[in-house]
Amino acid sequence: MELRVIEKSDNELSIEIAGEDHTFMNVLKGTLLEQEDVGAATYDVNPEQSGGQTEPILTIKTEGGADPLDTLEDAAGDIKDKTASFRDAYESAV
């Protein structure tokens, strides 16, 4: 997975996540929206202004002074924890 910061401010982050598709991006977006300090999270896989760019661009807007990079890190950790719990439950069931 390759990440490239497109734009960053105190409360907003736009980052390109190369090689991913709707499956991963929807999970990431949904987990970000569960974070307390995230006001908005969305992604676009073919923004008009890109001239046909197809790698997803994730945009995060935070509230309350939260750093968007920190919220992204927290969301990634939550995804890791959820997948580990799912894997453990699956292995117990088999």
Image (spheres, rainbow, N blue to C red):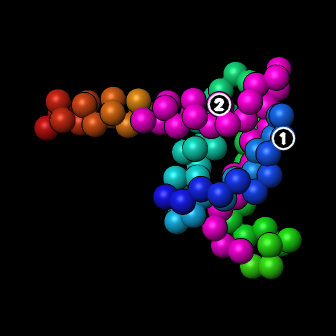
In the rendered view, would you say 17 is above or below 12? below
- The residue wearing badge 2 is 70
Residue placed under numbered mark 1 in the picture: 9
Where 59 sits versus 47, above or below?
A: above
Q: Nearer the viewer, residue 2 or 91?
A: 2
- Residue type at mark 1: give it: Ser
Per the rendered image, the range of residues in magenta is 53-80
Quadrant in the rendering for residue 52: bottom right
Badge 1 crowding class, 10 Å Cα cut-off, few under 14, some 14 to 19, many 20 or more, is: few
Picture quarter with the C terminus:
top left
Number of marks present in the image shown: 2
Element at label 2: helix
- Residue 71 percent coordinates (x, y): 65, 31
Front residue (pair 82, 67): 67
Q: Is residue 73 magenta?
A: yes
SS state under label 1: loop
Place of residue 59 in the rendered image (x, y in percent of width and height, measured from the top left): 75, 48
Q: Residue at (41%, 30%) from the top-left corner?
A: 81
Q: Earlier in the sequence, mark 2 or mark 1?
A: 1
**Residue in the image at 70% along x and 22% along y:** 36
Q: Was residue 25 drawn as part of the magenta stretch in this picture?
A: no
Could you tell me the amino acid type at mark 2?
Answer: Asp
Quarter where residue 68 is shown: top right
In the visual, does 62 lie left or right of 82? right
Q: Residue furthest left?
A: 94
Residue 25 pos. (x, y %): 58, 52
| Residue at the image position 25 percent from the left and 31 percent from the top | 88
Tell me if mark 2 has few (under 14), some (14-19) or many (20+) residues whose alpha carbon lies within 10 angstroms of its own. few
Q: Which residue is rendered at x = 83% and y = 34% of the image? A: 10
Left or right? Give the position of 41 relative to 92: right
The reply, left or right, for residue 83 in relation to residue 50 is: left
Residue 9 at x, y = what percent? 84, 41
